Image (cartoon, helix red, strand yellow):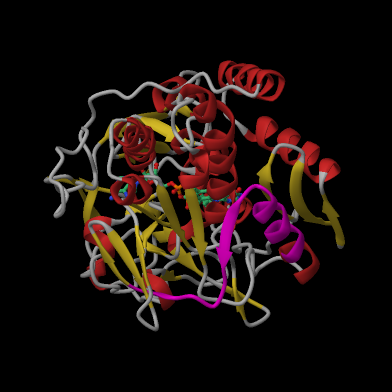
Amino acid sequence: MVPRPKVLIAGAGFAGLWAVQRLQNAPVDVILVDRNNYHTFLPLLYQVAAAELGPTDIAYPIRSVLRKSRNVTFRMGSLTQVDPATRTAWIDADPVEYDHLILAMGATTHFFGVPGAAEHAFPLRTMDEAVPLRHHVLGRFEAAAAETDPVLRRRMLTFTIVGAGPTGVEFSGALAELVHGPLGRDYPDLDLSEVRIVLLEAMDRVLSEMPEELSDYARSRLERRLVEVRLGTPVSRVQPHAVTLEGGDQIATDTVVWTGGVKGAIGPEAWGLPMGPSGRVRVTSHLEVEGMPGLWCAGDLAYLEEEGEALPGVAPVALQQGTTAARNILRTIRNEPLQPFRYRDPGMLAVIGRNAAVARVGGRNLRGFPAWVLWLVVHVAKLIGFRNRMLVLVNWAWNYLFFDRAVRLILPYARSVPVPPDIVGSRAPER
Ligand SMILES: Cc1cc2nc3c(=O)[nH]c(=O)nc-3n(C[C@H](O)[C@H](O)[C@H](O)COP(=O)(O)OP(=O)(O)OC[C@H]3O[C@@H](n4cnc5c(N)ncnc54)[C@H](O)[C@@H]3O)c2cc1C
């Protein structure tokens, strides 16, 4: 019997899973590799960090997704190297031969070389970053409740978010609702006027990808929720208890959340692949890595321009590219001409909080309650798994009706960013 072509897919995010879906029951053998055994629905990750949802509400076990796929196997591990010449990839230390490989490892945080950012700021791109951030935020309230020095207490209660793109805006809004809702009731002895949520943005508006009218609306809604929005304010340094702004101003803070930049999730050596801006892999319009037949790339990791502009790192691009890459693999196997990728843009959405969102859909700008309802519907519909949809709906309904959050446990958890003991008035950091 002639062996069937072997397709390796690295990454079970949107691009990887949609590629798998297209290859299910096709005449190929598929191995899906991910360093985690679950898929994360990243658009709702900030809600895990803001204690609105639990990790299991937005993560789904990959093996459950694949239960009905006879030709797909899953392997938990990291893709550590690729040799396109011999069509060999390494999963951790194991070499695996492939006929076709789709690189779909997504993106990671880019700190732009700002001193101290990688060491002291909290990134927010993976589940194991969101959960420690949640513990840290809740832990700062516990520490502040026991603190008698007002200077230290204010620093503990100052939360700085760097980057006013969708994640920065959404997290700031959700944090403001957490603080001025449930935490306000949990800590009646804390003076909430000591809490500061500061959103720092180097550009001159928030949500710069959106039309200006929607940016202005988002900013005014954040300010109504007592978020200080500081535009045209690049960060020049992050320290354990402070962030320094270009120009020299300092904000005393124990919490810097970095949502300011992304780059492709590939090592600095990049295995000799042709690289585009922001550490993304250059692909042809068919999503094949330039000059490397059999090697494909889709999603946030792929660099492709349409009409002179790089395609954005958003979920619809990733899942459409995953499908096209898989289709083109099948066309290659059948000796058929390849299909170029054309992005069908469904629009953009961002939520500021209860009843407030912005949307650019079908050439129209929506804001406020209609945009918020649209945001809810789209996000629930896109979640993987009926159970997750139900859990998210129940949690949201509870939050909405009772102004409460179910997830407020501070669990022992390996911290991703240590808060060293205070220089002044040494106090042991919470775990
Ligand atoms: C906090 C946040 C909020 C977002 N909100 C929105 C939104 O509202 N709307 C929107 O359209 N987009 C949003 N995005 C962007 C969107 O999530 C991404 O564009 C999309 O997830 C990209 O899909 P992907 O498959 O390329 O990568 P990912 O979904 O990131 O998946 C990559 C997968 O690869 C795995 N992986 C990484 N490296 C390796 C390796 N070496 N070996 C094995 N596995 C590996 C990871 O574990 C992961 O499962 C958001 C992103 C973030 C981080």
Q: What stretch of residues is rendered in magenta?
A: 216-236
Q: Is residue 254 above or below residue 297?
A: above
Q: Quadrant of the C terminus?
A: top left
368 versus 249 height, above or below: above
Compared with 210, 94 (above or below) is above
Left or right of residue 32: residue 299:
right
Depth order, front residue of 72/245:
245
- Expressed as whole percent of the image width and height from the top left, the position of residue 117 reads 28, 64
Q: Nearer the viewer, residue 113 or 102?
A: 113
- Is-magenta flag for residue 218? yes
Query: x and y percent of residue 46 in the render?
Result: 50, 42
Residue 311 shows in this picture: yes
Q: Residue at x 65, y 35 (%)?
A: 382
> Which residue is at the front of the view, 431 or 167?
431
Residue, x 17% and y 49% (percent of image)? 422
In the picture, which quadrant includes the N terminus? top left
Residue appearing at x 26%, y 61% in the figure: 118
* Residue at x 44% of width, y 28% of height: 189
Where's residue 236, x and y in %? Answer: 34, 76
Q: Is residue 348 left or right of residue 201?
A: right
Which of the 4 image quadrants contains residue 156? top left
Q: Report whether residue 99 is seen.
A: no
- The quadrant holding residue 264 is bottom left
Q: In which quadrant of the rendered view does residue 208 lie?
A: bottom right
